[in-house]
Amino acid sequence: MARRVTIADVAERLGLSKASVSYALNDQPGVSPETRRQVREMAAQLGWYPSSSARALSRAKTGAIGLVLSRDPDVIGTEPYYMRAMAGIESVLVAADMGLMLRIVGTDPGRDLAIYERWAGERRVDGVILFDQREDDPRLPLVTRLGLPAVLNGGPATGSAVPSVTSDARADAAQVVAHLRGLGHRQVLHVTGPTRFMHERRRAAALRESATEQGMEVESIESDYTFEAAALTVARRLGGGPAPTAMVFGNDLMALGGLDAAVDAGLAVPADLSVVSWDDSMLCRVANPPVTALDRDAFEFGRLAATMLLQVMAGAAPEDVVTPPSRLVIRASTSTARAATL
């Protein structure tokens, strides 16, 4: 861990006693309002944070790991993938008698970085798990600079010392393409999640590559991970020209939104349009019709990431882990392609 700024550092900069600085920072009497203001400004300038516990002062372990999600809280509350992944993380932490500190900070740039800075300054967590890698992800050099042990779930973190747990996007895409190709589909619409996330770019590239090898065409359209946005995206696409014969969605919520939009457009699923989700969940099983989906075992992703982080925290340097290919669960939302083309 990087050296922690102390009350003594603040006192030295201002030419005050440590007691005066302590009074000012802890809202105790004994200093003037002007001194209190100066102390707080200098503390902020130096990056001083209060210790979260007496154990942190002695550099003992906090017994917690951190997870910051830069997503809309409404999405996190309805997206099963994160709930299952966190269950996998918790399964490891419970056995290790550790806790999980979760923050959902929305999508405004930089808010997650401030959390990592504060956690490191306050010694609130012993390590962090990073989700949703972005291009030139600023979190990777930040956690290294802060000395925070970290693991990237959904990497690989190319060019970084942060180890990762990731899925085989090529193998997953090949399964989806082979299934649709076998049903006679040649034109596929791929509704992705936000392409600022590297895993969405890898999936799109893998799907196009596999489809090209099979003589198929893929059209990609970016959406977000919500039911409503996917429904609107699909409605606009279906109203803008000949429909594809199959659609692949970046998650289960989007698949249900797309299915809803297709029905509203007068298309029957799967007679007119087949639907596939890149994530499986109970939502896919109870949909009408039930949705064909990739079972990516989010629980195992979380379990592997937490296990790897504990290894990093213990001083090990584990290698990146690529999970086995997902299992394509075939349900009633896919069938033989109709004759229409893009």
Image: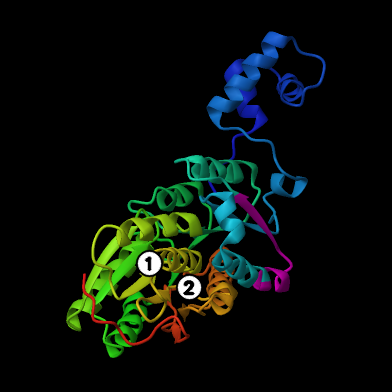
**Which image quadrant for residue 77?**
bottom right
Q: Nearer the viewer, residue 13 or 258?
A: 258
Q: Nearer the viewer, residue 173 or 198?
A: 173
Residue 144 percent location from the top left of the image? 45, 52
Furthest-bottom residue in view?
Answer: 182
Q: Which residue is mark 2?
A: 279
**Which image quadrant for residue 117?**
top right
In the rendered structure, which segment of residues is drawn in magenta?
91-103
Is residue 92 part of the magenta span, yes or no?
A: yes
Furthest-right residue in view?
Answer: 29
Alpha-carbon distance for marks 1 and 2? 20 Å
Residue 79 percent location from the top left of the image? 56, 63
Which residue is rendered at x = 49% and y = 43% of the image?
Answer: 113
Is residue 65 part of the magenta span, yes or no?
A: no
Question: Where residue 95 is drawn, which disc sits there?
Answer: none
Q: Dot 2 lies on which element?
A: loop
Q: Dot 1 lies on which element?
A: loop
Residue 151, above or below 146? below
Q: Which residue is mark 1?
A: 156
* Three-letter amino acid code at the position of disc 2: Asp
Q: Is residue 156 left or right of residue 299?
A: left
Which residue is rendered at x = 61% and y = 66% of the image?
Answer: 83
* Three-letter amino acid code at the position of disc 1: Pro
Q: Nearer the viewer, mark 1 or mark 2?
A: 2
Residue 55 percent location from the top left of the image? 74, 50
Q: Nearer the viewer, residue 266 or 316?
A: 266
